[in-house]
Amino acid sequence: MLKIEDLVVAYGGIEALKGISLEVEEGKIVTLVGANGAGKSTTLRAITGLVKPKSGSITYNGVNLLGMKTQDIVKKGITLVPEGRRIFPNLTVLENLRLGAFFRKDVNTIKNDLDWVYNLFPRLKERSWQMAGTLSGGEQQMLAVGRALMSKPKLLMMDEPSLGLAPMIVKDIFNIIKEIHNQGVTILLIEQNANAALHTAHIGYVIETGMIKLKGEGQDLLKNDEIRKAYLGENVSN
Amino acid sequence: MIKMTLDMFLQHLTNGISLGSLYALIAIGYTMVYGILRLINFAHGDIFMMATYFTFFGVLFGGKWYIVFPITIILTALLGMLVEISAYRNLRDAPKISILISAIGASFLIENLAIVIFGGRPKAFPTIPLFTSVVHIRNISIQRLTFIIPVVTVILLLSLLFLINKTKTGMAMRAVSKDHETARLMGINVDRTISITFGIGSALAAVGGIMWGLKFPQIQPLMGVMPGLKCFIAAVIGGIGSISGAVIGGFILGIGEIMLVALLPSLTGYRDAFAFILLIAILLLKPTGIMGEKISEKV
């Protein structure tokens, strides 16, 4: 579905990605784990056209995404839940969700998708008239996910959805990710919480200082000694 | 103390309201652009000036006002969009100071082009009796325009608030004003949204310019400078970024200025200084302005 080859992205003279290749197959949950500054977010930003890669290729169902504008990439069914949620605090919850469906013309099915999102996150329905800025952190994350779902994505990418959330809410978020996946959405997930991410994902990639270090099935990576040492600590699941 | 009859007071008040309405119309353009780009569009006052010339030449070439006015508004909106595309668009990711300097450059360019093309000598703005004739109520004699201006302003303000709060375009504008990048992720065409914002702001300045020309019927290429500065001040007083704030600021400035001159005629020469003193005061006392957005925000 999504294929990245030898992708190099540089900020100024510094290469954040030094030629990574990865593939997201349709129907899978794929995760990219790694430490701060490893290049995880940059990968997602390159896919959505928010940063311009120096070289390499990104294709989506055979279509070259390089050089396309973000607003057109989104229309192809790729959506990003950005790091830090980035909801619009000055808009109501409902308006945020409507913005997710901004480019869609199929007015009737938007209504169904809104019901679907409200079903996934009943809290958002209760608060639909509230300004999004007044929601709690966990609610804002739900809104960010709900907003992304309103674009009816085929590929949903999430950048650190568990960041800064209480452990109970993190659990909810990962359950929701599985639920969304069960509805037929392919997922590319970025996490520092390697433990939770690898438990959820079919395929995992480990990225370190701009290079892919390991690739494997989520369960296998969990058993990998190197990973256990570097990302999982002994028993600590950070 | 100056003795003032009720009639006189009412006359001053209507004058103040009508001047305040004009300030408000122009101030909205500053506040909208600031809201979406965090930029003070210094060329805004000059765009306002250009509108008066569009009308001047339209009428000169025999156009009827009901044809010339809409054409003026459209041309001015296009001019505003052209300034954005040529002077600001390529600097979106540049440091703030670059785009600010570009704005000052755009302002000087328009002013000097106007001097070259139209000549520096003032021109007489056409009088249109429907607007400029005088009516008498009790002992007050007032131009029709004095009543027309606030009414037009209120209608435009309500339409603008509807556009911003109730339409899809308005929702996109509000989203872009908070976060360009995330707005792009929603599939919003950010450049187009910014263009529309400049178009609307400039169209309002055009309406302001036409009515300004009718009220003070002498136009010249630098006429946009002082109203431009004052309306910028009005926007700051009201809380830059807030549309209702710009309107409130415009009225405070307009009514305050007229009342100052009326109550203390000896200070007439300081009329323009009033705006700047008010600016200093507001920056000292409440830098975010009357309706300014609160800085604190949950993250």
Image (spheres, rainbow, N blue to C red):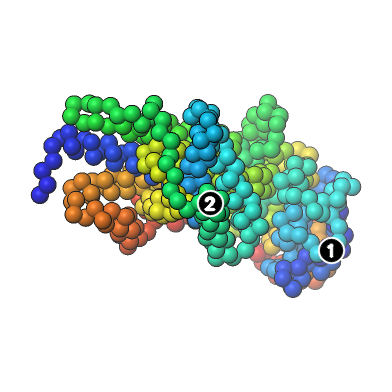
Residue B40 visible in the shown view: yes
Q: Position of residue B216 (x, y in %)?
A: 37, 42
In the image, taking residue B124 as reference, residue B100 lies left or right, namely right
Identity of the residue drawn at 32% across and 45% down:
B254
Tell me the number on the disc at residue A42.
none
Q: Which residue is mark 2?
A: B114
In the image, taking residue B87 as reference, residue A69 lies left or right, namely right
Tell me the SS state at disc 2.
helix
Q: Quadrant of the C terminus of chain A?
A: bottom right
**Which sits in the foreground, B124 or A221?**
B124
Identity of the residue drawn at 82% across and 54% down:
A66
In the image, taking residue B261 as reference, residue A194 lies left or right, namely right
Mark 1 belongs to chain: A
Mark 2 belongs to chain: B
**Which sits in the foreground, B14 or B214?**
B214
In this picture, is B11 found above or below A225? Answer: above
Eye-nearest disc, 1 or 2: 2
Q: Position of residue B201 (x, y in %)?
A: 51, 43
> Hey, what amino acid is under mark 1?
Ser
Residue B103 visible in the shown view: no
Q: Which residue is mark 1?
A: A55
Tell me the SS state at disc 1.
strand
Q: Position of residue A55 (x, y in %)?
A: 84, 63
Q: Callout 2: 10 Å neighbours few (<14), some, many (20+)?
A: some
- Marks 1 & 2 on one chain: no
Count of labels shown? 2
> Hey, what amino acid is under mark 2?
Ala
